[in-house]
Image (cartoon, rainbow, N blue to C red):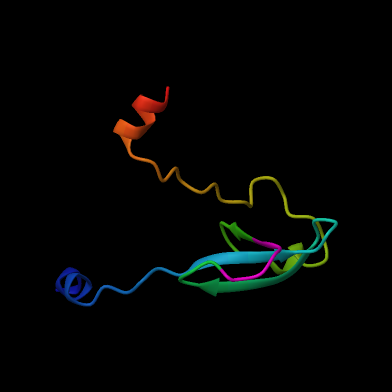
Amino acid sequence: MASLWNLLFKRSRDNTYARLDGEGKCLAFKRCGQAPTGSGWVQVSEAHLAWLGRPLPGSARVCTPARRRWPERLLAA
């Protein structure tokens, strides 16, 4: 029954973002459906309070997927 409710009422998934200063240190976290406006925001896999005031570990950042379609990719090569 739970899967029926999930199909009927889909919620947008919130992503986690971290704001970095000029030195790469974490200043804040934010969870939202769209990327925050302004500079310094990067998408991370999760928020850890221990990262505040410190540089993010390399494994924390999330890579953005490619947006181009396969035919366009093949023609560009």
Residue at left 33%, top 39%?
Answer: 69
- The image quadrant that residue 43 belongs to is bottom right
Q: Position of residue 59 (x, y in %)?
A: 64, 46
> Which of these two is toward me, 46 or 28?
28
Tell me which residue sits at (59%, 58%) in the image. Answer: 44
User: Does the stretch in magenta take in 5?
Assistant: no
Residue nearest the viewer, comparing 34 with 59: 34
Query: Which residue is depicted at the point 32% across and 74% down?
Result: 11
Q: Given the current orientation, which residue lies at the most extreme right position?
A: 23
Quick check: 72 left or right of 59?
left
6 vs 43: above or below: below
Up/down of 63 relative to 46, above or below = above
* Residues in magenta, as a range: 36-41
Q: Quadrant of the N terminus?
A: bottom left
Pick out the residue farthest to the top: 77
Q: Which residue is drawn at 18% across and 76% down?
A: 5
Q: How many marks?
A: 0
> What x and y, as percent, mark residue 71?
29, 32
Vertical side of 3 occupied by 24: above or below: above
Q: Quadrant of the C terminus?
A: top left
Query: In the rendering, at what x and y percent does residue 56 appear?
Result: 73, 54
